[in-house]
Amino acid sequence: MAKSIYSADQESLLKVLGRIRTDAGLSQQQLARRMTVSQSTVSDILRGQRRLDVIEWISFCKACKVTPQEFLEELTFLLTRK
């Protein structure tokens, strides 16, 4: 498995993160407030410049009103289509 954060799998993860935020109708600033992080942190995450740890990922899901299970189902679907 590639060590780079710029792998095809990482691109799939970024796609899911972006879609979920958009579907929740949240701006980066609104998401940042809900996650209690800075807007620049959210921007870095969504651009793939910074990875989420599991606690941040759960906070992201909660802020966007999706369950971690729903998130993983969508990500798994994208990853297994390859």
Image (cartoon, rainbow, N blue to C red):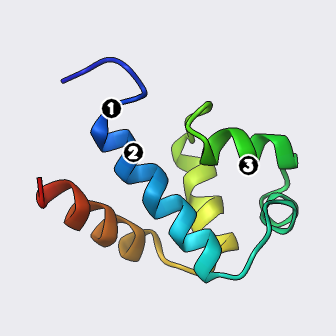
Q: Which residue sits at x=63%, y=61%?
A: 60
Query: Cα distance, mark 3 to mark 1?
Result: 20 Å
Q: Quadrant of residue 31?
A: bottom right
> Which mark is first along the chain, 1 or 3?
1
Rendering coords of residue 58 (x, y %): 56, 60
Distance CA(mark 1)–CA(mark 2): 6 Å
Q: Quick check: marks 1 and 2 in contact, CB under 8 Å? A: yes
Looking at the rendered structure, the kind of residue marked 1 is: Ser
Q: Earlier in the sequence, mark 2 or mark 3?
A: 2
As drawn, is 6 to the left or to the right of 21?
left
Residue under circle 3?
A: 42
Q: Is residue 33 left or right of residue 7?
A: right
Q: At 52% from the left edge and 70% from the top edge, which residue is drawn?
A: 19
Relative horizontal placement of residue 81, taking residue 28 as reference (left or right): left
Give x and y (percent) for residue 14: 48, 51
Please give the residue where the numbered disc 2 appears in the rendered image: 11
Indicate the amino acid at tag 3. Val
Residue 3 vs residue 70, the one in the foreground:
3
Seen in the picture, residue 5 relative to 31 is either above or below; the reply is above
> Can you say whether 7 is above or below 3 in the image?
below
Identity of the residue drawn at 55% across and 37% down = 48
State the residue in front, 77 or 59.
Answer: 77
Which residue shows up at 12% across the image and 61% down it? 81
Residue named by callout 1: 7
